Image (cartoon, rainbow, N blue to C red):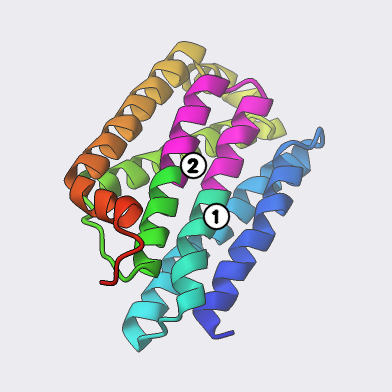
Amino acid sequence: MILPNQLTTLRILLTPIFLFLFLSENSELKQLSLLIFTIASITDWYDGWLARKFNYITAWGKFMDPLADKILTSAAFFAFVSTGVLELWMVLIVVFRDIFVTGLRLFAEWKNKIFTTSRLAKIKTAIQMTFIFYILIVYTLKENGFIKSNFSDLIEILTNSYFIFYSMLMITLFTLITGLIYINQNKMMIFQLFFNSGKKD
């Protein structure tokens, strides 16, 4: 259990804590959820950096690290649905696409195959994380008494339902498109994985 794998495990363990805090009726706990999510996100960057710098690459880490990322981001998206911030159907598309592609990539690695990952997929991940942090920041600051008293008009603008809806709609479409591009780029590999799996490499 090397350090990068410990950080991956920590990220998974922090996810239900984040959910509990964000969904709490207590304003202080809800604000604390932003800190927990930030720490969990930092472990994602740091364990990847450690793995690359010191060659801490393990089969367990290669499997669990991307899975832990999807667990964290999916939990955030579903938490936003639970509080009425986002539409369920859009979140389902985003989460299904990400889990499907991640599962496909992990299955390919298990078969000693490497899939091509487009630059658009990396941009997609960055946009998703930026949006999640935006939602977390504005909705946790909304719980702060000082902010609520002095910047209520600004908070109303930042939490505008139309802005959030159409922002999430664009993210959903972009996420779906990158998934289709990913499948198209690797269609031959996918065919070989599922229809030639009985043959020796």
Q: Residue at x 49, y 37 (%)?
A: 95
Is residue 15 toward the left or the right of residue 190 in the image? right
Between 63 and 77, the one lying in front of the other is 63
Is residue 86 in view from this perspective? no
| Residue 178 image-quadrant placement | top left
Question: Residue 157 location in percent, x, y?
Answer: 48, 17
Majority SS type along the magenta span: helix
Q: Are marks 1 and 2 in contact (CB under 8 Å)?
A: yes
Q: Is residue 25 left or right of residue 71?
A: right
Reply yes or no: does residue 77 show up in magenta. Answer: yes
Residue at 52% across / 66% down in the picture? Answer: 64
Q: Return the residue at label 1.
A: 38
Relative vertical location of residue 91 with respect to residue 186 in this rendering, above or below: above
User: Sequence-wise, which precedes: disc 1 or disc 2?
Assistant: 1
Q: Quadrant of the N terminus?
A: bottom right
Mark 2 surroundings within 10 Å by alpha-carbon count, few (fewer than 14), some (14 through 19), many (20 or more): some
- Horizontal side of 71 relative to 52 (left or right) equals right
Closer to us: 198 or 79: 198
Q: Is residue 96 above or below residue 166?
A: below
Percent coordinates x, y for residue 89 in the rendering: 52, 21
Which range of residues does the magenta coloring cover?
72-99
* Figure quadrant of the C terminus: bottom left
Q: Which residue is mark 2?
A: 133
Secondary structure under the numbered disc 1 in the rendered image: helix
